[in-house]
Image (cartoon, coloured by chain):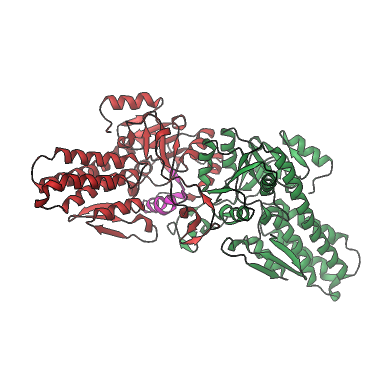
Chain colours: A green, B red
Amino acid sequence: MKPLEWINGKLKFLDQTRLPLEEFFCETDDVLFVAKAIKRLAIRGAPLIGIAAAYGVALASLSLNHSMVKEARSYILSIIDILASTRPTAVNLFWALKRQRRVLDAWQTDSISDLQNNLLNEAKQIHQEDAEICERISSFGAELLSDDCSVLTHCNAGALATGGRGTAIGIISKAWELGKLKHVYIDETRPLLQGSRLTAWEIDRAKIPATLIVDSVAAVLLKQGKINAIIVGADRITMNGDVANKVGTYSLAVLAKHHGIPFYVAAPVSTIDAQMSTGKDIPIEERDAREVTELFGKRTAPEMVHVYSPAFDVTPNEFVTAIITDRGVHRPPFSDSLKRLSLRGELVG
Amino acid sequence: MKPLEWINGKLKFLDQTRLPLEEFFCETDDVLFVAKAIKRLAIRGAPLIGIAAAYGVALASLSLNHSMVKEARSYILSIIDILASTRPTAVNLFWALKRQRRVLDAWQTDSISDLQNNLLNEAKQIHQEDAEICERISSFGAELLSDDCSVLTHCNAGALATGGRGTAIGIISKAWELGKLKHVYIDETRPLLQGSRLTAWEIDRAKIPATLIVDSVAAVLLKQGKINAIIVGADRITMNGDVANKVGTYSLAVLAKHHGIPFYVAAPVSTIDAQMSTGKDIPIEERDAREVTELFGKRTAPEMVHVYSPAFDVTPNEFVTAIITDRGVHRPPFSDSLKRLSLRGELVG
């Protein structure tokens, strides 16, 4: 299942807002349509929005022709700005755009088609790399899990969120293939229900035994001893190991600690923000109140009610058992292990 | 606002499943319609279903006529059984039916109208008592709160759930009247959204400053220091102080403890089950999977997904700061303080 593909000069993507009711694909050559798709979560998941943004820059370059050599640079820069403004929290978006910015900066010829080729190749490279990254994360993670284990996951950090098999769900499906996994519990993940709409859909297709729960039932299962580990993805990880991820993650992390269950975060190193030392500085996107007060256009709360709806929360490093990246498994103190990654030049940013 | 009233030989009640979209009242003289209303949560909230069941028995007796003296007893007993089978967790239901059972047992004359009057009077008495109980709970609870405090509540333990101003929400509205309350945070309370549909509606009518959140945002607010106390209702309290309440309560209780915030449970003594020593024995109702997989009839999860949807969870006494009843505030060790209530003959059951 590919949530996003480059086909004949267009970007084809699954409109994830329509799942699980329909598998509806859009095809577009319009970068603004891609930006809007990221904004309205038709394309979502930290790694995938990075990939989509990179393709978006490539798409934009295709609208340039050979008489536009002079304007090309400022046009592409403005497109990068537009894409960067779609969502504030996931750092992969900025990382992917930075890679395209470097391609733009390295463009020295007067050939528009050189620029177009270079941007498209970089996007394809980011996409392909992400598939390999998912494989590595999945192998590292599956190794960590005990035999016959049951795992809880939150939101969707699967194939729908990445260029490959997923991060958290990649680990889960890998563990299933290795015969180590007994059961998956899926948080529905309010307000946008990425757990029931997306993760349950993916896990169902993979034929892994699973149970869907409302978010607050996680604590009940933890108390019953039914969960051996919690694995989530991440939208941004700071150099001290603090983790921004879908709202509800912090709650799970506290509950995991209280019940003595390991809490794993799975993400590519591109999710690590080398410029940010602690989670306190991560900008947290706030979502529209209607995502909480309406369901399918019908009101579920009084008209004037005030809503606080952060899309993400920050889990302090003390609650994180390990961060599983494509460059290996990192354990506390994260400031040491992530610094070593940085010193080895393995962090971009 | 009265969620339930006895008018001209009929029971009039607000269909709470239709809130906040419409304030739709049903009027019925059919006890089976009342039983169904309890089952489908048109009438809900532990104290209110006790009151409704008591009126239901009175309604049933009205269908008896003077030639039916012999069958009256077994008929009323069968109605009590039907009402008792509507929902398994809230003990107030069984407590109210036990009171009607005692009225039936005490009926010694051959007069059907005596029986009818006695059952109706008992129902009215239970209803009236509950209003007074709410007042006492609200006063005891408001006294506990610190000045200028912000409180989080879960589900709906308000006027809609009781015969009076509510238990948890009674305390909140009382504290507001006393000028002690700064803000209320309302958990939406998945899956049936009693927080957004019912509590937000009540709090809005009372003009108390409030913010609605999805359940998993509670942890975020606790971390931000925005919440000074959590107050919830209860469906059953065992003699050691374990508390069954709407699912999500246990999660909040663990989070409250972790963040050093008091966790209060507000309930009438009729919610205390004198026959049950620990929460392990409380039967927990499981709800239909469709409450999780569908919204307004539209699927939000794949067809075949397995769902675990307990309506309630049990919070062990170690997480409860105090139990606020109409007979005063009880603090740990609850087995001592609740036993004293029992020895004073203040527990029914």
Relative horizontal placement of residue B45, taking residue A326 as reference (left or right): left
Q: Residue at 77% x, 41% y: name it.
A: A328
Query: Does residue B172 lie above or below A302 as drawn?
Result: above
Q: Position of residue B128 (x, y in %)?
A: 23, 43
Relative horizontal placement of residue A174, taking residue B162 as reference (left or right): right
Residue toward you, A345 or B272: B272
In this view of the protein, can residue B164 be seen by the observer?
no
* Part of the protein shown in magenta: B182-211
Query: Does residue B185 lie above or below A27 as drawn?
Result: above
Q: Position of residue B43 (x, y in %)?
A: 33, 51
Residue toward you, A143 or B48: A143
Q: Where is residue B130 in the image (x, y as percent from the top left)?
A: 27, 42
Question: Where the C terminus of chain B falls, by quadrant?
Answer: top left
Q: Residue at 84% x, 41% y: name it.
A: A344
Q: Where is residue B121 in the image (x, y as percent from the top left)?
A: 17, 45
Q: Is residue B126 magenta?
A: no
Q: Residue at 45% x, 32% y: name it.
A: B316
Relative horizontal placement of residue A47, taking residue B31 as reference (left or right): right
In this view of the protein, can residue B157 be seen by the observer?
yes
Q: Does the magenta stretch include residue B205?
A: yes
